[in-house]
Image: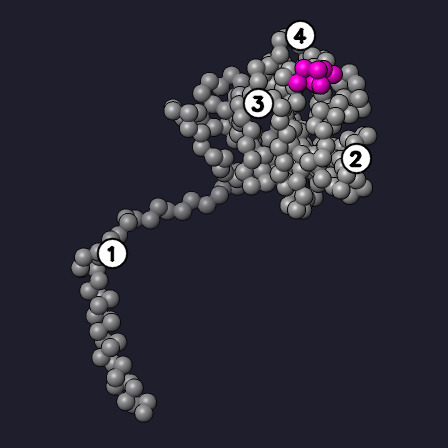
């Protein structure tokens, strides 16, 4: 029986082999894509250079803070009043004009009139997204400030019912996007006409904070097309901060609530 099966398969295998060999000469034939570029591996520069002896600081170690006086009912940040969250931070850090807690005097004054003058409220429409991957939404706020600056802050519900700020930065923002669980900021590249900064903030489970995991300088293409963030991540310098000035209010970058 085995000899008979072998005899039957032999012509079939011969035909398949002939077809495979003739495939390069017929219609739809395989064609060479040319010579493969020679791979160039990474080169370690200055191999004799002694490494730094100081242990680098853990980036983002001071970027989180519990917002005093704010309780998150049922762990649902949708129930929070965004203006009240920002006002609670101002109350906890009065006369603070720089850093993660800093706001301009003009912005603080506008916060106090949000109920009476909602159109002039510096706190923009809130957005919600699960940034940490725990199945619960985080609160994302934008705060307009003078000189076309925008503060972007993100908050997560704490296990004890409180609210923790996990991201805070301020810059001259062109746009803010959500991509998956990343918050992507496009900002002005000062002194570099035709370019912009593109920074993707992502949740870091070790730090329990949003960190700028990808930072790049991108050329603005004609026609208003902007490529999506790409490339390996790197730790950028601390977000740029500017001292308060008496300049007029910023031009809105998004719709106010």
Q: Are marks 3 and 1 in contact (CB under 8 Å)?
A: no
Which of pointers 3 and 1 lies earlier in the amino acid sequence? 1
The secondary element bearing badge 1 is classed as loop
The mark that comes first in sequence, 3 or 4, is 4
Side of 125 where 192 appears, left or right: left
Q: From the viewer's side, name the closer residue of 143 and 237.
A: 143
Name the residue beneath numbered marker 2: 71
Q: Are marks 2 and 4 in contact (CB under 8 Å)?
A: no
In the rendered image, the vertical position of residue 157 relative to residue 126, given as above or below: below
Q: Secondary structure at mark 2?
A: loop
243 sits left or right of 74 in the view: left
- Quickly name the residue at label 3: 255
Q: Answer whether residue 194 is visible to the viewer in this image.
A: yes
Magenta highlight range: 112-118
Rendered image quadrant of residue 113: top right
Depth check: give the residue in front, 206 or 130.
Answer: 130
Q: CA distance from mark 3 to mark 4?
A: 23 Å
Q: Residue at x 67, y 34 (%)?
A: 139
Which of the two labelled residues, at mark 2 and mark 1, occupies the earlier sequence position? 1
Q: Quadrant of residue 204?
A: top right
Query: What residue sits right under mark 4 in the picture?
Result: 246
Q: Residues within 10 Å of mark 3 (few under 14, many from 20)?
A: few
| Whole-percent x, y for residue 157 in the image | 73, 39
Q: CA distance from mark 2 to mark 1?
A: 66 Å
User: Disc 1 marks which residue?
Assistant: 30
Distance between mark 1 and mark 4 Cα atoms: 69 Å
Q: Which mark is residue 211?
A: none
- Could you tell me which residue is drawn at 60 percent across and 21 percent down? 256
The quarter of the picture where the C terminus appears is top right
Q: CA distance from mark 3 to mark 1?
A: 55 Å
Asked if residue 219 lies in the magenta stretch, the reply is no
């Amino acid at each position: 029986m085995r000899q008979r099966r072998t005899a039957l398969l032999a012509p079939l295998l011969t035909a398949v082999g002939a077809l495979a060999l003739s495939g390069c000469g017929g219609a739809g034939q395989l064609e060479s894509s040319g010579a493969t570029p020679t791979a160039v591996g990474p080169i370690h520069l200055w191999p004799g250079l002694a490494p730094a002896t100081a242990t680098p600081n853990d980036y983002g170690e001071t970027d989180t803070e519990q917002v005093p006086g704010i309780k998150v009912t049922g762990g649902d940040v949708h129930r929070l009043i965004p203006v009240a969250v920002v006002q609670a931070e101002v109350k906890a850090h009065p006369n603070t004009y720089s850093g993660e807690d800093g706001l301009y005097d003009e912005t603080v004054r506008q916060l106090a009139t949000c109920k009476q003058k909602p159109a002039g409220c510096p706190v923009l429409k809130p957005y919600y997204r699960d940034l940490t991957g725990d199945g619960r939404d985080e609160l994302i706020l934008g705060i307009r400030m003078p000189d076309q600056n925008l503060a972007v802050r993100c908050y997560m519900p704490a296990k004890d019912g409180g609210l923790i700020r996990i991201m805070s930065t301020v810059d001259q923002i062109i746009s803010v996007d959500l991509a998956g669980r990343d918050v992507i900021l496009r900002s002005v590249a000062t002194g570099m006409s035709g370019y912009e900064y593109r920074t993707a903030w992502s949740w870091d489970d070790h730090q329990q904070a949003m960190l700028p995991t990808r930072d790049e300088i991108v050329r603005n293409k004609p026609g208003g097309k902007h490529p999506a963030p790409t490339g390996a991540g790197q730790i950028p310098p601390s977000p740029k901060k500017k001292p308060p000035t008496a300049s007029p209010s910023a031009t809105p970058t998004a719709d106010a609530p």
